[in-house]
Amino acid sequence: MDTKPLRRQEREKLEVPTLVHLARNGTVTEEMAAVSERERLPIGRIVEEIAAGTLIVPANVHHAGLAPIGIGRSAGCKVNANIGSSPLCAEVGGEIEKLRVALQYGADTVMDLSSGGDIPAIRKALLETCPVPLGTVPVYEAVARAADIDGLTGDDFIDVIRSHAEQGVDFVTVHCGLLRDHVPLARRRKTGIVSRGGSLVAQWMIHHGRENPLYERFDDILAISRAHDLTLSLGDGLRPGCLADASDAAQFAELEVLGDLCRRARRAEVQVMIEGPGHVPFDQIAMNVAREHEVCEGAPFYVLGPIVTDIAPGYDHITSAIGATLAAFSGASMLCYVTPSEHLGLPDLEDVRAGVVAYRIAAHAADVALGRPGARDRDDALSEARYRFDWEKVFSLSLDADRARERLRGSGEDFCDLDTDYCSMCGPRFCAMKLNRMLDEKDEAHK
């Protein structure tokens, strides 16, 4: 195996620059080396898993300044944050600010779901600013470009994917597994097709009376991906939109197709992951993860939530983080955050903050439970700092230092400063940790 890492600029010049191709030929790249160091895993294992398709490193050869990450069961669980404009709110500066907040609070990847305004300009600005893998959903732009669904062609879908790949997008969601035969299955549901991309593709198939062009032109998509090392995120256009629709015939029919497409992508030396549900009762989550791993032969599973109850609009960052923790513990490799505005409106900056932090908690809890190398180091260090009332250290180790600082300080009569050896919940006389420290000091004095 060649152990001198191949640089991105060198990889960009290759006829086949995909990490899968290079791994299968024993070539180590700077992306592989970076993931090996971050995950504390031997470089040989990283290369082996990339070659097998059980670990992916979304890293388009045109994305300069990218800090690579690994997504797979052997790596720490990753968190994606969705941002992006809508036809009702489309401004580049606002999306850059959402990106800043997502990165500040720990997003590992970011997806631009823009469907309004100057979509290519928004994407260009984000790519120039984003040091983590950036994903998109090309079907949104394809539909936004067209005057109506009547004039949209298969070539239009492919052309947009090509433009995203050439611009430097690291991974794209493509709804290739939703077929015409699946649409009647979805009509039996309470909420039908809730995926935006899935519903747009279904509308196109019904209107034109033809099969999904993304499925029929999958070889063209593979060729584009192979040329730029564009990672494919095979979208679950039939993910359930409520608990009653979870784990139904429509969802699993699409999953079978995604398994076949995953194998085709691997044969083409293209990186691929599988997207998953959605709204799922707590007791069905582990089964869903296990089924994806079996059908898709260990491909990384990228799940939205899952949301475990339908009755908490405004709190779906919580209902989904509960499901996300179990999904990650059961083997999901990346979690797509859900914000408090899910089902209600376009997320603002505070929604992005709340969503990322909730999902960082979920991913971290799973990493700790799975015993991943170093996962609990931060917990132990923070606990020691709490016991010493070293508030600055507590804040520096917190997922949201500003929020923790706000909660300590309180207001009015509850005010505490950084010199106090208690918080306003217990006060100086009833603080258990303070009392324990006093016992420790007495023990020391009697020795």
Image (cartoon, grey):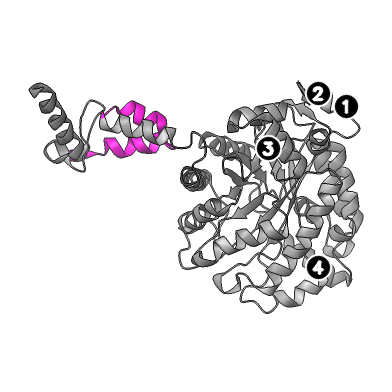
Vertical position of residue 169 compared to residue 286: above or below = above
Q: Nearer the viewer, residue 269 or 302?
A: 269
- Which residue is the site of mark 4? 179
Where are the magenta residues, as a range? 388-413
- Which residue is the site of mark 1? 13
Q: Report the number of numbered marks.
A: 4
Kindly report the distance in space between the C-alpha atoms of the residues bearing marks 4 and 1. Answer: 37 Å
> 147 left or right of 362?
right
For image coordinates 21% across by 29% down, the residue present is 420
- Which residue is the site of mark 2? 9
> 257 left or right of 400?
right
Mark 2 is surrounded, within 10 Å at the Cα level, by few (under 14), some (14 to 19) or many (20 or more) other residues, namely: few
Residue type, numbered disc 4: Leu
Vertical position of residue 350 compared to residue 280: above or below = above
- CB within 8 Å, label 4 to label 3: no
Res. 111 image quadrant: top right
For marks 2 and 3, the one nearer the N-term is: 2
